Amino acid sequence: MALVAYMPKSFGGTIASPYRSNSSFAEETQSRMPALDLEYLLMPVFRKAEDDLKRMRGLSKNWDTYGAEPPTTETIAHALKLLIRLQREAFTPTRIVPSSEGGVAVFFTRGGRYADIEFLNTGEVLAVTYTGKAEPDVWEITGEPLEPDIRRIRNHLTA
């Protein structure tokens, strides 16, 4: 069964498949993302994360009282793209929050194992895995696809 994401009229009223592997879906989503007045693109289990992304649109500079920049529209769009990929993999994040570094952080926890992917407003994408007090494993994600990084995080969490 193929899943589809119903896009509202503000997105052209089209139906887009998160399974489409070409870049047109991502480009179309990003090009229309500035309005961000979307209905749900994701299945119910991912809707809290999607709602959290929507709320980030309203953050202003210094939202954390330490001078943090709010996530940019482009950064939010990249995080939404990740959520669509995670949905395809049936890999639900634990939490999605604005980053104090300026961006969006997507967290995963399973037992005592932790991981996150952080989309920074600078365009950098960082990932980290760690367990307890052990030294974290940090790497930069460059380019596409994200699937090897998602697999690396999933493997860490299920080890």
Image (spheres, rainbow, N blue to C red):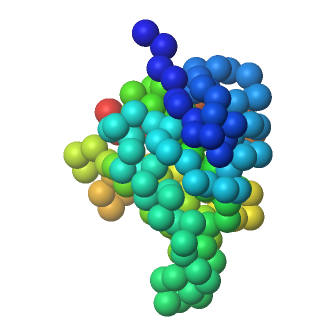
At x 32% / y 33%, what residue is drawn?
A: 158
At x 60% / y 26%, what residue is drawn?
A: 15
Q: In this view, does 1 lie above or below 131?
A: above
Q: In this image, 48 relative to 29: left or right?
A: left
Nearest to the observer: residue 127 or residue 118:
118
Q: In this view, does 5 lie above or below 45?
A: above
Q: In this image, 69 relative to 92: left or right?
A: right
Quarter in which the C terminus is drawn: top left
**Residue 14: quadrant of the picture:** top right
**x and y percent of residue 130 in the render?**
40, 52
Q: In this image, 135 relative to 35: left or right?
A: left
Count of numbered badges drawn on the protein: 0
**x and y percent of residue 57 in the render?**
57, 66
Nearest to the observer: residue 57 or residue 11:
11
Question: Residue furthest toward the left?
Answer: 111
Nearest to the observer: residue 135 or residue 148:
148
**x and y percent of residue 122 in the render?**
74, 64
At x 50% / y 58%, what residue is drawn?
A: 54
Residue 127 visible in rendering: no
At x 28% / y 44%, what residue is drawn?
A: 110
Question: Residue furthest toward the top?
Answer: 1
Nearest to the observer: residue 47 or residue 22:
47
Q: In this view, does 53 lie above or below 60?
A: above
